[in-house]
Image (cartoon, rainbow, N blue to C red):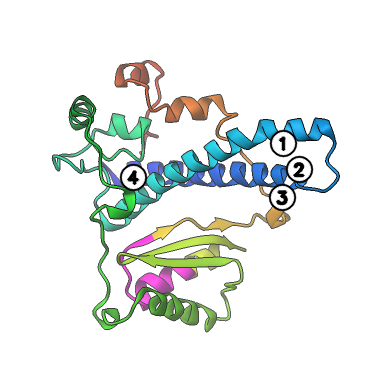
Amino acid sequence: MTNEEVLFLRNVLVDRRNGILERVERLAAAWRELEEPAIELEEEAQKASITKPYDKLDENRKAEIAQIDLALIKMSVGDYGVCESCGEDISPKRLQVIPWARLCVECARDFEKRRRSLPETSEAPISGKVPDEYRGMDNQQIIDLIYERLQNDERIETEELKISFKKGVVLLDGRLESEREHELVLRLIAESLGFSSIVDRIEINEPGMESDEISERDPEDDEAGELFYDREMSEEAFDAQGIAFPQVS
């Protein structure tokens, strides 16, 4: 796959992840409203009707986010698009339909036929390279070090920035005020600190918008989005939709 194709799928994965988190937060807010005292009988019925689907969505979406995060980590260490069973490349067509796919078509069919399952995402053997000078440090020490370096740069505001570190990979979440600040963060972590594996999930606050006014896109309400992510869609059906990677001149 080309760098442009990987970048395109990276953006698809991040958008999907953000959409899931926004949907769960909206449902959580609705749940909190139903927790208010002195609930009427009709509100009790509404509460009962929302409990089961909310619990199910929470469980399923957490699993999907874990798959997305694993795919993003694979991108950062250069293992994205490689089948975890046979080691061959997963076809671009399959990755367009299921960007977080861990198996090629042939191995996926074999796993289904034999009723086999992959290891949990947390157990996947993926790891990034830790610079030699940090090898004796634990994860929290490395996180503290990164925060300290960023906070020492007066051009960077870290209040809404969330950093985690796992298996040699730096994971960035939260929001920054500008693309320039975003670039400074990535440059400092990659060039100054020497970390080569970075998962970038940072959002940029658009000018004139408050953080809580950022558009809430619901992936389940977007028919085109659902089509793009349909796990059951065959590659033939995918071709019939005429969906393809953006062409790079």
Q: Secondary structure at mark 1?
A: helix
The answer, for residue 12, to whether it is visible in the render is yes
User: Which one is in front in this view, the residue at disc 1 or the one at disc 3?
Assistant: 1
Counting residues from the start of the chain, the first of labels 2 and 4 encountered is 4
Label 2: which secondary element: helix
- The image quadrant where one finds the C terminus is top left
Tell me the amino acid under the disc marked 4. Answer: Val
Spatial separation of the CA atoms under disc 2 and disc 1? 6 Å
Q: CA distance from mark 2 to mark 4?
A: 43 Å
Which residue is under mark 2?
A: 34
Distance (Cα) linking label 1 and label 3? 27 Å
Q: Is residue 188 magenta?
A: yes
The span picked out in magenta is 185-198
Task: Mark 1 or mark 3: name the one nearer the start of the chain.
Answer: 1
Among numbered discs 2 and 1, the one appearing first in the sequence? 2
Q: Is residue 67 left or right of residue 38?
A: left
When the figure is inspected, residue 164 is found, relative to residue 55, above or below; the finding is below
Sooner in the amino-acid sequence: mark 4 or mark 3: 4
The type of residue carrying mark 2 is Leu
Q: At x 21% / y 26%, what residue is drawn?
A: 109
From the top left corner, tell me how far across and down residue 3 is, in percent: 31, 47
In the picture of the structure, the residue carrying the numbered disc 1 is 47
* Residue count near mark 3 (Cα–Cα under 10 Å), binned few <14, some 14–19, many ≥20: few
The local secondary structure at tag 3 comes to helix
Counting from the top left corner in percent of width and height, residue 9 is at 39, 41
Mark 2 vs 1: CB contact within 8 A: yes
Q: Which residue is mark 4?
A: 6
- Classify 114 as above or below 195: above
Dot 2: few (<14), some (14–19), or many (≥20) neighbours within 10 Å? some
Where does the image place residue 230, in percent across and percent down from the top left? Answer: 42, 26
